[in-house]
Amino acid sequence: MTDVPSEDPAGPPPLVVVPGMLCDAGLWDDVDFPEGHAVHHVPLRRDGIGALAQDVLSTVRGPFVLVGLSLGAIVGFEVLRRAPERVAGLCVMAANPGAPRPGQYTAWREMDEQIRAGRFTDVVERTLPDMFPDRSPTPGGERRYRAMAHAVGATAARAQLAAQATRTDATGVLRTVRCPTAVLAGARDALCPPAFHRTIARTVPGAGLTLLPDAGHLVPWQRPDAVSSALRDLVTAVGTTPDGPVPTPS
């Protein structure tokens, strides 16, 4: 990225928002972002987590609040490895902090082969149930997800699959986080269950966990009210946190 927006250094930090796989900025359409904060959406079009993290860091100058869902949160973990001083606040949703499992590598290869064979629609249909509570989408939810995934397209999907395979375990970097952190989990998320988020919240010093009983994986669609509230609370915490590490709870 060559044209980096200038932010007011005296103003509130911008929000840099990163979606999940087969998702775009439409994932956040129902979210009421905090007033007074610029919002920058980062598309996922590169084939490595490191390259995507650099895209995030190139989006704005100076500190920012990082908001990530699923693959977007995983990119956020890499941002924290590379430039923790840039992250003034962190919001993690529907994420797996662990390294890929053997079965995931197999599934990603299979989906990439399907896309290369011209069967991108099959991949969209394969991923669709996992986006919804208890893998049970509504007809409206199905239509909305299909439209968003096809807007992302096959080329970006292949890059995202390749990026997934470059993930590493984030536990070590999560222990080093020293900014206000909010973790949101859908209690009915079949893809990234609450146990993943409890691990994140336990590992990040001072992190708060919100468990949403009626949400699945696409938390910003299924509970935009909770996401909006969490972001307002997060930017308030960022604005009132003095410089220096967040103390680890005793």
Image (cartoon, rainbow, N blue to C red):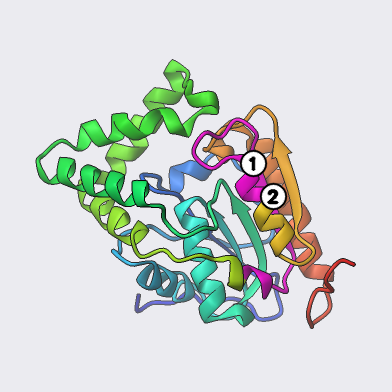
Name the residue tied to disc 2.
198
* Callout 1 secondary element: helix
Q: Which residues are magenta?
A: 174-198
Asked if the residue under mark 2 is in contact with the one under mark 1, i.e. CB atoms within 8 Å, the reply is yes
* Callout 2 secondary element: helix
Name the one closer to the observer, 28 or 211: 211
The amino acid at mark 1 is Pro
Name the one closer to the observer, 18 or 246: 246
Viewport quadrant of the N terminus: bottom left
Name the one closer to the observer, 98 or 5: 98
Q: Is residue 51 left or right of residue 86?
A: left
Q: Is residue 183 left or right of residue 147?
A: right
Q: Quadrant of residue 199?
A: bottom right
Residue 14 position in % (x across, y down) = 61, 67
- Work out whether residue 30 can be spotted: no
How would you rate the neighbour count of disc 1 (Cα within 10 Å): few for under 14, some for 14-19, many for 20 or more? many
Q: What residue lies at 23% left-to-right and 49% top-to-bottom?
A: 109
Q: Which mark is residue 194?
A: 1
Q: Is residue 206 left or right of residue 113?
A: right
Farthest front residue in view? 102
Residue 50: within the magenta?
Answer: no
Residue 104 position in % (x across, y down) = 36, 48
